[in-house]
Image: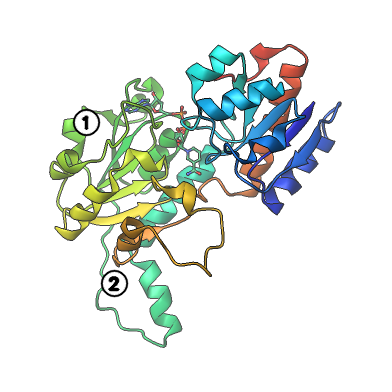
Amino acid sequence: MKIAVFSTKPYDREFLTDANNCLEHPHQLVFHESRLNSSSCLLAQDADAVCCFVNDQLDAPVLQQLAEFGVKLVTLRCAGFNQVDLAEAKKLGIVITRVAEYSPHAIAEHALGLILMLNRNLHRAHHRVRENDYSLNGLLGFDLYQKTVGIIGTGKIGATLARIMQGLGCEVIAYDTRPDPALAAAGVSYVALEDLWPAADVISLHCPLNQYTHHLINAVTIAQMKPGVMLINTGRGGLIDTRAVIDGLKNKTIGHLGLDVYEEEANLFFENNSNSLLQDDVFARLLTFPNVVVTGHQAFFTREALAAIATTALSNASFVERGELEKTCQV
Ligand code: NAD
């Protein structure tokens, strides 16, 4: 299959090339650095498939253009598929596959990293020591031991984080539309959302972004949270109403915020913008808080995850090529 691969950085090319070379019948990969959108779409003109990432635009106009070019498959290099107009893809007969699981540990461990960084102010401590400043004022943290962690979405990543937090001696409560009996048996208490908000010292988001979860964290839900709560989002930016969170930080309802995703990240993340002026005033305000840590959608970024993503995305294309759709993770 000839596959136009969008949003590729040198590390993507390395892992995809290695995975492709391991296939019995390797694909013809054409790498593009640009994101897929209505202008870059032309790059897929003679491709059978496109391979896309989280911020590629797969809305109706782009899908229609891809269909006109004869593209039959979108093989996603990610788990989430909120960037795809699924109804339009179905109408056009374009198959969409994703990488349902690569390394839930990568994302869960990153969420833990954000929790520990914020909890003990490691981001501030690091800068102080480099300035020859060893004062502790402002670095006071709290023990995670015996604190209550609320996990929203206990699929592969949420369940992994739940077990990690239990290992630290936390009480884990959770909300999921489809509770996991194995996790409940392991001591995680499933509760209604209205009971999770006031009980949790730390809230971590691991549900998909869709019409039901968009702005799940908003002014109304923030008002129900424990004052000083730590909020962690490694799910998708749109789960949070950023302006409401800024208000929550200002009135101290939110004591700590750790983000790996941001609702307007498509214009910011994965690029070196250090020579440009930051145009997003909401994001700029977020960065002024000492109790906020942001990483640029890097929770997935481990060797193990990149290798698994590349192998699955290309194997999905091989399965589709051979008509073995049932072996793919079709969306
Ligand atoms: P998963 O499908 O295994 O789990 C999602 C869970 O959310 C399921 O248990 C599902 O029942 C639950 N859910 C669905 N709707 C819900 C709702 N309204 N309220 C509460 N729970 C709900 O997915 P996963 O692999 O654990 O990934 C979770 C999310 O993490 C993905 O959707 C993706 O957006 C995000 N993600 C982020 C990164 C990153 O690098 N930051 C990497 C991978 C995935």
153 left or right of 69? Answer: left
Relative vertical location of residue 265 with respect to residue 317 in this rendering, above or below: below
Q: Which mark is residue 181?
A: none
Q: Does the image show residue 103?
A: yes
Answer with the quadrant where ligand 1 appears in the image.
Answer: top left
Callout 2, which amino acid? Leu
Relative vertical location of residue 152 with respect to residue 7 in this rendering, above or below: above
Q: Quadrant of residue 321?
A: top right
Callout 1, which amino acid? Leu
How far across and how far down the image is residue 219, in percent?
Answer: 17, 43
Q: Nearer the viewer, residue 13 or 232?
A: 13
297 left or right of 147? Answer: right
Residue located beneath label 2 in the image: 139
- The residue drawn where x is 45% and y is 37% is 160
Indicate the quadrant containing the N terminus: top left, top right, bottom left or bottom right.
top right
**Which is nearer the N-term, disc 1 or disc 2?**
2
* Ligand 1 contact, mark 1 (Cβ < 8 Å): yes
Q: Does the image show residue 97?
A: no
Residue located beneath label 1 in the image: 193
Q: Nearer the viewer, residue 205 or 46?
A: 46
- The residue drawn where x is 71% and y is 38% is 43
Task: Give the label, 1 or 2, closer to the camera.
Answer: 1
168 left or right of 224? Answer: right
Query: Disc 1 to disc 2, how far (Cα)?
Result: 31 Å
